[in-house]
Image (cartoon, rainbow, N blue to C red):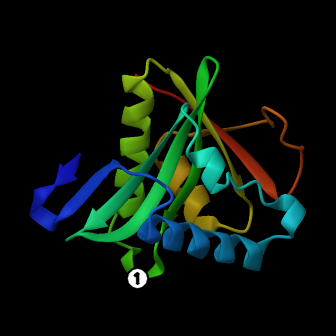
Amino acid sequence: MSGAEDGLAIAAESPDTPEALALLAASEDAMHALYPAEANFLLDVAGLMAPDVTFLVARQHGEAMGCGAVARRDEWAEIKRLFVAPQARGRGLSKRLLAALEAEAVSRGIGTVMLETGDLQPEALGLYRSTGYAERGPFADYPAGPPSVFFEKRLE
């Protein structure tokens, strides 16, 4: 998946490369600044390398600017670790990365994606609402209540 006109390429990569690790570390720093440790449900690098997980990296002109993962969970999938570097925000990269994750789910025969995000992330909440995600209750083993906000989307 690419956007040759703006130098954007989104592709599956290993989450243990130095550039991916730097994005994941920046993501973790951002989440730890907003929420207590018990409210951070971050899939670690080992989890991101599981066979049922696809980890995507968005590169603009070769530089890693964002990442995200789609993890198969029975008949549905979960979006995990969607993150765009601060210097790359405001360019629509998160929306394109989310679309690539959804396309990956569809290519694996998955018709529904779910995710958990936090109530102190207005940009993330806006992204999910603007791309067709509907709020829902907790799923899997997530606890109910703040700071978690849960979303679901049926894919075509």
For image coordinates 44% across by 52% down, the residue present is: 14
Lateral position of residue 28 relative to residue 37, left or right: left
Q: Which residue is denoted by mark 1 in the rendering?
A: 87
- Measured as percent of width and height from the top left, residue 60 is found at 25, 68
Q: Is residue 75 left or right of residue 12?
A: right
Amino acid at circle 1: Gln
Nearest the viewer among 79 and 62 is 62
Picture quarter containing residue 119?
bottom right
Q: Quadrant of the C terminus?
A: top left
Above or below: residue 131 compared with residue 71: below
- The residue shown at (85%, 36%) is 141
Label 1: few (<14), some or many (≥20) within 10 Å? Answer: few
On the picture, is 124 further left or further right than 41?
left
Give the image location of residue 80, x and y in percent: 60, 48
The answer to which quarter of the image holds residue 41 is bottom right
Viewer-side residue, 93 vs 71: 71
Q: Secondary structure at mark 1?
A: helix
Where is residue 64 shown, x and y percent of the image?
Answer: 35, 69
Q: Residue at x 29, y 64 (%)?
A: 59
Residue at (89, 44) in percent of width and height: 143
In front of the other: 84 or 151: 84
Q: Quadrant of the N terminus?
A: top left
Instruction: Look at the picture and state if 58 lies above or below 129.
Output: below
Residue furthest left in the image: 5
Number of marks in picture: 1
106 to 94, vertically: above or below: above
